Structures are given as structure tokens and as C-alpha cells.
Amino acid sequence: MKAVIKTLCLVVGILSLGACSSWIYRIDIPQGNFLEQKDVDKLRVAMTKEQVTYVLGSPVASNAFDNDTWHYFYALKGGRGNNFEKQLIVEFKDDKLQDIKGDFDKSAEFSTPLDI
């Protein structure tokens, strides 16, 4: 009988240790386009869609009804609860880069086209 109680206590103890979430490894889950400010700084007004795709990659979301607005979004769900999100909205007019908005700064050279 004592062996059964000891075994039962051992099993309960091991199972309770498994419930300690601080000991469990949880992975980080990244989603979307990871962009850095140095990449956004390469953008210039009047760039073509192809040039923007070359610099930033393909957008995460595109609108079937408005092909002139591209959304770049990055989210990191940290395993320890530290979440991170950034977005960039790229607007075109007549298939040329018009403006950018979001969590990144425009470079000082953004308003200067590459052709000049």
C-alpha cells in the first residue's frame, strides 16, 4: 500500500511540474513582411510598382478593388507574451509611387525621384 501511495505522489508531482508554464518553451510566431527602416528609406516618389516590389517584396494584403494601395504588415507573437506589430501603407497613382504611411518614417530623399 505504501508503494502505491508513493507512486501516486510521484505521478502527481511530475504532472504538476509540467503545468509550470515558465518552464515550457514557446516559440515566436512571425507573420507578414519584416521591413526595416533602411529598406523604407530606399523608396522614392514616382517609383514603379515593380521597383517597390524589388525593394520591399510583395505586399501581405492587396485589395482586388483598389490595386493602388498596398499593405505591408508584420506581427510577431512572442512566446513569452511580448508582441510586436508594424505596418506600412504604400499608395500609387497611375502606377507610380505617390505616398507612404504607417509606422515608418519617410526618408528626407523620398520626394526626390530616382530619375533626377
Image (cartoon, rainbow, N blue to C red):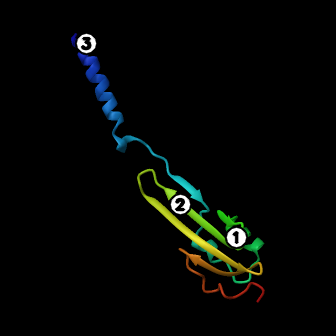
Left or right: 97 as drawn, with respect to 29: right
Q: Please give left or right for residue 72 compared with residue 27 in the image.
A: right
Residue 6 to residue 15: above or below: above
Q: Mark 1 points at which residue?
A: 55
Q: What residue type is labelled 3?
A: Ala
Residue located at (56% from left, 63% from top) = 74
Three-letter code for the amino acid on which mark 1 is drawn: Val
Q: In which quarter of the image is the C terminus?
A: bottom right
Nearer the observer, disc 1 or disc 2? 2
Q: Which of 47/116 is in front?
A: 47
Q: Residue at x 34, y 37 (%)?
A: 19
For mark 2, what is the residue?
Answer: 75
The picture places residue 11, in percent across and down from the top left corner, at: 31, 23
Which tag, 3 or 1, sits closer to the chain's start?
3
Give the SS element for disc 3: helix
Q: Which of marks 3 and 2 is nearer the N terminus?
A: 3
Front label number (3 vs 2):
2
Q: Which amino acid does label 2 sit on?
A: Ala
From the image, tell me which residue sits under label 3: 3
Query: Do the CB atoms of the residues marked 1 and 2 lie less than 8 Å apart?
Result: no
Determine the residue positioned at 78% across, 86% down. 115
Seen as rendered, the residue at the extreme left is: 2
Gap between marks 3 and 2, in whole Å? 52 Å
